[in-house]
Amino acid sequence: MIFVVLGTQRFPMNRVIDKIDNLIEIGFLNKNKIVIQNGHSKNSKYAENLGMIDESAFNNYIKNSDIVITHGGTSSIIKALRNNKKTIIIPRRADLREHVDNHQFEISDMFKNNGYAEVVLDIEDLKEAIINIEQKEYKKLSLPNGLADFLINDILKL
């Protein structure tokens, strides 16, 4: 199952929904194996839409997924990686009114550059990222000393 996480921000990420629907339409993705936590984004025409869900349900979907496609929110990324899920990050873009700035690009780059996840900047590259992620191995995330130590020592390397 692919779990798509678009978060709880009031800004929609409809380009992700449109691309998922397109990949279902062309037969690349199976609509019965896609679950979307779409928050404030529109509903998919084909996949299961969850809107907003509580943390327990969210964690259950993460646990039962094979691949997580997520916006660039730190919490969503770390929850996927802590559960050893292959993760594709699509950072929110300010120019598309998906956020007020592009800080998710920096967060996403840190995870990609350190070997934890794939990053899709151009939504047209999502299909290729799904193909690639199934064939690659990624570093496993462990947070023995907590999030702050992980960010400082492993990601920022301060």
Image: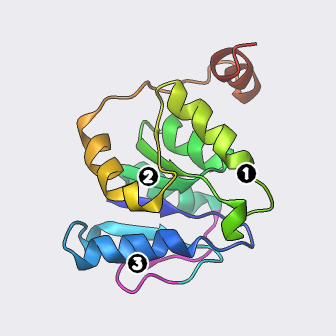
Q: Is residue 37 visible?
A: no
Task: Look at discs 1 and 2 and give the one toward the viewer.
Answer: 1
State the residue at coordinates (35%, 48%). 129
Q: Is residue 73 visible?
A: yes
Is 54 in front, or is 69? 69
Amino acid of disc 2: Val
State the residue at coordinates (74%, 63%). 99
Magenta span covers which residues? Answer: 43-54
Whole-percent x and y of residue 49? 47, 78
Classify residue 52 by image quadrant. Answer: bottom right
Classify residue 148 by image quadrant. Answer: top right
Q: Which residue is mark 2?
A: 68
Q: Is residue 33 left or right of residue 44?
A: left
Amino acid of disc 1: Asn
Q: Is residue 106 left or right of residue 139?
A: right
Density class for disc 3 (Cα within 10 Å; few <14, some 14-19, many ≥20) is some
Q: Earlier in the sequence, mark 1 or mark 2?
A: 2
Assign a secondary structure to mark 3: strand
Magenta-span inclusion, residue 44: yes
Q: Which residue is mark 3?
A: 48
Does 82 appear above or below 99?
A: above
Q: Which residue is mark 1?
A: 102
